[in-house]
Image (tube, rainbow, N blue to C red):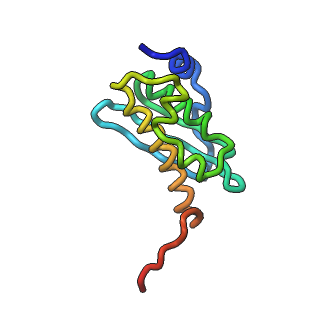
């Protein structure tokens, strides 16, 4: 049912934990399945220097979080923002259709952490005129 990569990332998750005083934090959850993911990021020179996560959920949710943390490390913020649920599922050699929502949650949590960083620092997307 699960690929070897999914099982490896579930049994040996990478980058588990918190970053002390993170530059950005993103949390998402799915009340239907009970999965909760929080991503913590450290940014240096517009690149993700460190990515850690805490996930409460099924094996697929843990594997997805682990894979995303690996995929995002070292990438620019824009590159990391473009990581899609399909990219994650492909890197994991597929996920069962009833677990694809986990890949959405992982990508969303990473994107929320980056958005949190950008909101705190005022960096990222161009400021839009306020109309005042």
Q: Residue at x 72, y 56 (%)?
A: 45
Name the residue rendered at 55%, 30% in the picture.
Answer: 66
Outermost residue toward the left in this view: 32
Q: Nearer the viewer, residue 106 or 121?
A: 106
Drawn side of residue 73 relative to residue 110, left or right? right
Q: Quadrant of the C terminus?
A: bottom left
- Residue 110 image position (x, y, % from top left): 51, 44
Residue at 45%, 44% in the rendered image: 108
* Rendered position, 42 above or below 10: below
Q: Is 73 placed above or below 60 here? A: below
What residue is drawn where x is 46% and y is 35%?
A: 86
Q: Quadrant of the N terminus?
A: top left
- Disc tally is 0
The percent coordinates of residue 44 (x first, y second) are 70, 52
Side of 120 where 61 appears, left or right = left
Between residues 82 and 56, which one lies in front from this camera angle? 82
Q: Position of residue 59 (x, y in %)?
A: 45, 21
- In which image quadrant can residue 32 be found? top left
Q: Is residue 78 above or below residue 36?
A: below
Q: Nearer the viewer, residue 8 or 25?
A: 8
Asked if residue 17 lies left or right of residue 56, the reply is: right
Most extreme residue toward the bottom is: 132
Percent x, y of residue 56: 43, 30
């Amino acid at each position: 049912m699960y690929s070897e990569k999914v099982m490896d990332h579930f049994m040996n998750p990478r980058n588990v934990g918190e970053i002390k005083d993170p530059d950005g934090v993103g949390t998402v959850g799915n009340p239907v399945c009970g999965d909760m993911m929080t991503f913590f990021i450290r940014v240096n020179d517009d690149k993700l220097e460190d990515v850690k996560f805490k996930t409460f959920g099924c094996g697929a949710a843990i594997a997805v979080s682990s894979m995303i943390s690996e995929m995002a490390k070292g990438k620019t913020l824009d590159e990391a923002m473009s990581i899609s649920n399909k990219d994650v599922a492909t890197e994991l050699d597929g996920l069962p259709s009833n677990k694809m929502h986990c890949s959405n949650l992982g990508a969303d949590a990473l994107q929320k952490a980056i958005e949190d960083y950008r909101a705190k620092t005022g960096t990222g997307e161009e400021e839009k005129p306020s109309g005042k």
